[in-house]
């Protein structure tokens, strides 16, 4: 029998209604639409405004959309995993909360946090479960409410991040489709330049941490920028070389969406022409674990069965890597119109 591989057999997303434009941000801090668009490529981002809602609510919407689109019954799901950095609570796991909200009862699941590489690391991990032959339907959902950790008085970070969610269905394929190879790396040196200082076990929340504004994203932008370009380009190139692939063999590059200039620099180092590089940062900003599945969702109609795809990400930690996969179906999967 042919090797069992993990194929993405459906994708669906959800973004909250409220759109925060560059113009609105320009009224909060000393910036401009021109600066934000030219330095980051971001035009707008979606924000979850309603009180009392969190990452699980957007994640559950994405999973429900996925179920409708792929005609999947919640009771048939073997495993549901949430990935991201903005969990509803420190515990229990957000996967449990989403499973409850969407009616998944016969499954197990857990959370994976690898910064903006959460989705990539989760895909690599869950592919191993599918490859055992024991698991047939795995739901992976990335959802983020980053707006709660954004300091809207800091012009260096507040234009960058947005809220949103997207989910994929993973199923076994014996046709040579799905995840073929991957490289994933971590380097803790990066923890100093991109993190959230307070709220964890080292520096628990207190009046002082709030007064010092330590519950917001801290980032040394230029350092992270340089590391992101070289790491995503190097791992994508290494992965292509060891699979005997040239730029001509690649149909799509799906990069983490943190900055348009990072994406362009990565694409040109890998040697890919612009039309093969998927970009939707203009609409959503950086949604961390949701960037890659939101990209797959937005561009799904263009994909064909057997397309060669490289997914590459870089995030807090540092965490980074690349996946080589063969796409498993033609066009938009919509067995049950939503
Ligand atoms: O997903 C996790 C990984 N994260 C990333 O990959 C993000 C990586 N970093 C970046 O995307 C970029 O570094 C930023 C977008 C954060 C910043 O862009 P930059 O081109 O690296 O700007 P910079 O930090 O070098 O700042 C250049 C200038 C500074 O002014 P001076 O010191 O030259 O006078 C900043 O104060 O731009 C200023 N600046 C702004 N000006 C207007 C910074 N933010 C703004 C702003 N509007 N929003």
Image (spheres, rainbow, N blue to C red):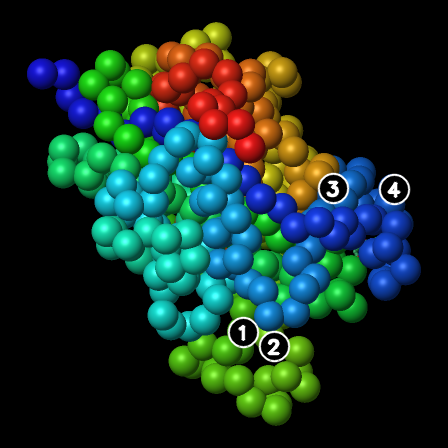
What is the distance, in whole Å, between disc 1 and disc 2 at their CAs? 5 Å
- Mark 2 or mark 3, whichever is nearer to me: 3
The residue labelled by disc 4 is: 34
Q: Which mark is residue 134?
A: none
Foreground of the two, 46 or 318: 46
Q: Which x, y percent locates residue 5? A: 23, 26
Tell me the crowding category of disc 2: few under 14, some 14 to 19, or many 20 or more residues within 10 angstroms, Cα based.
many
Task: Say what secondary structure mark 1 lies in.
Answer: loop
Q: Which of the marked residues, 2 or 3, is nearer the chain's N terminus?
A: 3
What is the distance, in whole Å, between disc 2 and disc 4 at their CAs? 29 Å
The residue labelled by disc 2 is: 214
Foreground of the two, 127 or 320: 127
Quadrant in the picture for the C terminus = top right
Task: Say what secondary structure mark 3 lies in.
Answer: loop
Q: Are marks 2 and 4 in contact (CB under 8 Å)?
A: no
Foreground of the two, 119 or 165: 165
The residue labelled by disc 1 is: 197
What is the distance, in whole Å, between disc 1 and disc 3 at their CAs? 26 Å
Q: Are marks 2 and 3 in contact (CB under 8 Å)?
A: no
Residue in the picture at 65% in, 33% down: 280
Q: Are marks 1 and 2 in contact (CB under 8 Å)?
A: yes
Q: Which of the marked residues, 3 or 4, is nearer the chain's N terminus?
A: 4
Q: Which mark is residue 42?
A: 3
Tell me the crowding category of disc 4: few under 14, some 14 to 19, or many 20 or more residues within 10 angstroms, Cα based.
few
Task: Say what secondary structure mark 4 lies in.
Answer: helix
Q: Quadrant of residue 134?
A: top left
Residue at the left extreme, as displayed: 1
Q: Which of the marked residues, 1 or 3, is nearer the chain's N terminus?
A: 3
Side (left or right) of 315 relative to 130? right
Q: Which x, y percent locates residue 109? A: 28, 54
Side (left or right) of 44 relative to 118? right
Residue in the picture at 43% in, 81% down: 202
């Amino acid at each position: 029998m042919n090797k069992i591989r993990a194929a993405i057999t459906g994708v669906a997303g959800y973004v909250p209604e409220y759109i925060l434009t560059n113009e609105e941000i320009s009224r909060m801090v000393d910036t401009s639409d021109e600066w934000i668009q030219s330095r980051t490529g971001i035009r707008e981002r979606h924000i979850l405004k309603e009180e009392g809602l969190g990452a699980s609510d957007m994640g559950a919407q994405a999973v429900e959309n996925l179920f409708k689109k792929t005609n999947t019954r919640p009771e048939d799901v073997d495993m549901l995993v949430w990935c991201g950095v903005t969990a509803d609570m420190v515990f229990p796991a957000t996967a449990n909360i989403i499973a409850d909200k969407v009616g998944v009862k016969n499954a197990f699941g857990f959370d994976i946090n690898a910064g903006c590489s959460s989705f990539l690391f989760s895909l690599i991990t869950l592919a191993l479960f599918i490859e055992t032959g024991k698991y047939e339907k795995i739901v992976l959902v990335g959802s983020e409410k980053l707006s709660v950790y954004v300091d809207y008085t800091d012009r260096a970070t507040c234009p960058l991040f947005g809220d949103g969610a997207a989910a994929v269905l993973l199923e076994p394929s014996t046709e040579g489709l799905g995840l073929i190879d991957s490289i994933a790396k971590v380097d803790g040196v990066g923890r100093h330049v991109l993190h959230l200082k307070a709220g964890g076990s080292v520096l628990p929340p207190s009046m002082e941490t709030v007064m010092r504004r330590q519950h917001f994203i801290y980032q040394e932008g230029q350092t992270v920028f340089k590391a992101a370009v070289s790491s995503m380009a190097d791992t994508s190139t290494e992965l292509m070389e060891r699979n005997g692939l040239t730029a001509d063999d690649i149909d799509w590059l799906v990069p983490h969406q943190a900055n348009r200039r990072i994406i362009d620099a990565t694409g040109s180092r890998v040697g890919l022409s612009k039309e093969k590089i998927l970009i939707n940062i203009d609409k959503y900003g950086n949604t961390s674990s949701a960037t890659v599945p939101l990209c797959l969702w937005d561009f799904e109609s263009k994909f064909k069965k057997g397309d060669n795809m490289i997914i590459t990400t870089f995030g807090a930690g540092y965490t980074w890597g690349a996946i080589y996969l063969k796409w498993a179906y033609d066009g938009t999967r919509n067995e049950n119109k939503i």
